Amino acid sequence: MSATTSIFHPYLSRILSSHLSSIPIDTLSRTPPSRLQTTALPNIGLIELVSATDFTTLYDPLYKASFPRRAEREDSDLITARLAAQSAGTRTGLAPYRIVGIRDHEGQAIGAAQFSVLPLPTHPYPHSDNTSSNDNNDTPSFAVPYLQYIYVRPSSRRQDMSEVLHTMVLAVASADALAMSAQPRTIPFTLFETEPPDHGDDATSRAYAKERSKIHTSTGGVAVVLHRESDGKILSAHVQPGLETGDPPLTLVWVIRQSPSPGRPWDIRSIGKDLVAAYYQSLRDEGFPEENIRLAERIVEARCKGADFYLMALGDVRDFTDPEHLDIYPSN
């Protein structure tokens, strides 16, 4: 199966269709194609890799409306510059940066997903009971789409548009991964961040966080946490550095959404630290403040001591800002 035989093919832009020419797109959808043909596709005019120009004119207003708090969204000028560099081929050595967008039949933005494709460090992983291999000398090679933002306009919700976007994220990331190195990389899951279900300063914000966690759980999302053996504590594996100089680090929750076609077995206990390393390396590559990145790294390094990476239901995660759940900050 290729892009030309996919149910999505009639809706793909020329550039996106070419990019996905060897990718079996339909196998990457968690939602049955028959359902998408009823709910989503009749409302779609175009699915595209968004250019810098189209982001500015079509998608940026929806992006800002979807994330109205300035602190929770990246500066649009930086996004535009990154898209322009990706299109010009000047991001050599950097993680591919993409925005997949959906337009309606009038050419207006329905929604978009903004993400980077992170290559994980390549080295032999120890095999565990649920990650068997036929070759003890093989070296699994992974890439992970890090989904920074996904948004759909209110009038197009409950039409499975987010499912279309999630599928396209996996498809584009799969194509990018094939081009990264001679050894094919596979995409085990999509990674993104969110707040714990009970996070917030008041009832309204806690209710919002709880609703988001329900949405992530309903679409197959599970939390990546650290389990410390000595006392059984659950710690967050994710600390977001301050995005601007002087901004403090922020503890959030990493959530993964497994690919329906992961390509090879994987184990979060084996690749967890590589995931952390790839995340912080991508921030360095993009020019975020080194002092902020290093502080966040030290926090995670301290949490990892004596702890294993672990997957748990997002609904069971407590707010890590609660002192009882040890939001650990190192002394140096």
Image: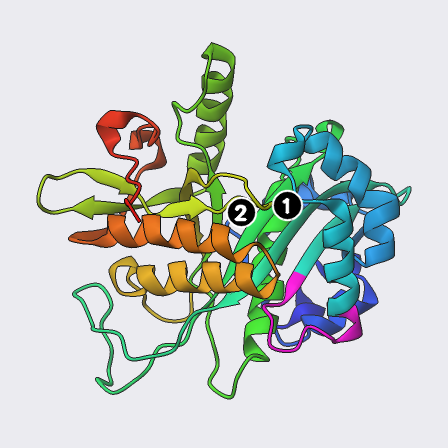
Question: Where is 48 relative to 4, above or below?
Answer: above
**Mark 1 packing: few (<14 Cα in 10 Å), some, or many (20+)?**
some
Q: Are marks 2 and 1 in contact (CB under 8 Å)?
A: yes
Q: Position of residue 148 (x, y in %)?
A: 58, 48
Residue in front for this viewpoint, 258 or 125: 125
Q: Position of residue 326 (x, y in %)?
A: 25, 34
* Kind of residue sitting beneath label 1: Leu
Mark count: 2
Which residue is the site of mark 1? 36
Secondary structure under the numbered disc 1 in the rendered image:
helix
Question: Where is 114 relative to 88, above or below?
Answer: above
Residue in front for this viewpoint, 274 or 138: 274
Residue in front for this viewpoint, 297 or 199: 297
Residue 90 belongs to magenta span = yes
Of the two numbered discs 2 and 1 on the same chain, state the one appearing first in sequence. Answer: 2
* Kind of residue sitting beneath label 2: Thr
Q: Which residues are magenta?
A: 87-97
